[in-house]
Image (cartoon, coloured by chain):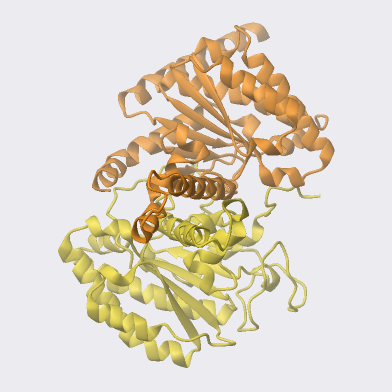
Chain colours: A orange, B yellow
Amino acid sequence: MNTLANTLFGNLISFIRRILFCILSVGPIPNHVAFILDGNRRFAKKLNLPEGMGHRVGFQSLISVLRYCFDLGVKYVSVYAFSIDNFKRKPEEVQSIMDLMVEKFNEMVEEESIVYQYSVRVYIIGNLSLLSDNVRLAAEKVMKATSSNNKSNLIICLAYTSTDEIVHATQESCDDKWAKIQSSIDGEMMEGKREGCFVIKVADIERRMYMGVAPDPDILVRTSGETRLSNFLLWQTSNCMLYSPRALWPEIGFLHIAWAFLEFQRTYPYLEKKRKEL
Amino acid sequence: MTILPLHLHFSLARSPLKPHSFPHARPQVVTGPAENSVEVNGTYPGGVSGQLPSGLRRELMPSHVAVIMDGNRRWARMRGLPIGSGYEAGAQALRRIVELCCEWGIRVLTVFVFSSDNWFRPKMETDLLMELFERVLKDELQHFERENVRVSLIGDTTKLPKSLQELLANSVGTAQKNSHLHLIMAVNYSGQNDVVQACQKIAVKVKDGLIKPDDINKFLVEKELETNCTDYPHPDLLVRTSGELRISNFLLWQLAYTELYFTNSLWPDFGEDEFVEALFSFQKRQRRYGGRNS
């Protein structure tokens, strides 16, 4: 009897999901959705799970959310997997998260993974020099293995903060400008021309951002009810819709995604108009 | 007084999916410790000032509050009034909030008066806003001096009418020690442009051989941002009225760890009660800065 009830319930949920899918597909779909995966540890504590299990459960949620997004036609999904600030946590916790990353990066290159099902190109961006060698190598391996995938894109922000990204972009811009001056054909560059070479514009910074691999996000979702950016995509979210459901990250479901998309569709005409003006 | 285009807005009441930051309950009475200066959660308590509303704890008051004053035009349209009336009402709301900040010991208040993205609005509207801003500023300058409010300006004023530029130049005072409140007005401001101009200044230092590209770090960038006019450049709390859920190119770098508070109230309706709700919401939050609570 219980099995029948469960089956009926499952079918009902599936039916509702399909209806919502159809409704959402009528309107504009965001091109890029970004997520701050907040609440894993609180979820583990709530359910009395062992330390570290929260992040594992959180990873399962990520897979579900990726399916929803890619099925709906989202081209880019970014996730704030690990901030530079998170290195302040207990070493054991940092280590367990890094071990989980390596495990999951290695799983991604397997054929049954979601990456191949949806032909997802994986980017792992951030200040990767802060990572230990094994994590960095696993990251490079998955980026290389998926470099020819072209249907969707998953951007994993690891050892990332926006302020670090901007500093890095500035350093690179200055490096480039300096190299241009040094290697100019006429070594005796006129003073005025040298001044001109060292003008930094918005395009210079944007070109060298880690997130330059994707357009700006249309929606930024932060779970667990916290409404702050925590140094994530500060530059890129200047006109992005912000959504902060109370659900902890492992509790996030299709309804939350649907709600965020509906809100996006409601504000889309105005945002498009503004984008064209700019 | 910000010109942000009218946007049709509806909200589904009491949905479990609604974002967290739309509090409805009045603050509970909470007794707090004595009012001595203690740094808690990275915020410094404001100067000793008037009585706080019940429920707010002095040691948890934000030092720096930033405001996106959205909804003036919508407010006017809902009442069948001309848009100018909306902005006038918005100016009144700003006066109220400045007074409350002085009274409650908030050190810095940054207000988004006009975005560099707003120039695409009809000329008649931008002219109207500039005239209103000039008039209100003239009226308020003496009041600010009396109340010991220090005024600073961030943004590119070169595109503004000449008379307004002169007035702004006169209103930006020299550093007043022990001022009750530092009011920072963001006029023709863009968060992205602020970061770019900071990077540009750093690039000039590199060109002149004062620093190497490898020396560039976040502290150097911070020093060159326009908010270097204050000791508290990072807002603890950002309030945006009218229900729009975005930053709209305001203080991007500085908002890295700011608690964001979005309310459905339109700016002219944002008064003491609404401000208390925002502060109460802020005081309930756990600010971890990427670390963990013990």
Estimate the x, y position of residue A32 in percent, counting from the top left. Answer: 43, 32
Note whether residue A57 is visible: no
Q: Quarter of the image holding residue A263? A: top left
| Vertical relation: B186 (above or below) A99 | below
Q: Residue furthest left?
A: B124
Estimate the x, y position of residue B165 in percent, counting from the top left. Answer: 29, 78
| Vertical relation: A4 (above or below) B218 | above
Q: Quarter of the image holding residue B200? A: bottom left
User: As drawn, is A143 to the left or to the right of B92?
Assistant: right
Estimate the x, y position of residue B53 in percent, counting from the top left. Answer: 60, 74
Judging depth in this view, the residue of A198 and A231 nearest the camera is: A198
User: As drawn, is A74 to the left or to the right of A272?
Assistant: right
Name the residue: 44% across, 37% down: A217
Q: Quadrant of the N terminus of chain B?
A: bottom left
Name the residue: 62% across, 25% down: A61
Judging depth in this view, the residue of B72 and B206 nearest the camera is: B206
Note whether residue B151 is visible: yes
Question: How many numbered marks does the figure carry?
Answer: 0
Estimate the x, y position of residue B177 in percent, counting from the top left. Answer: 58, 87
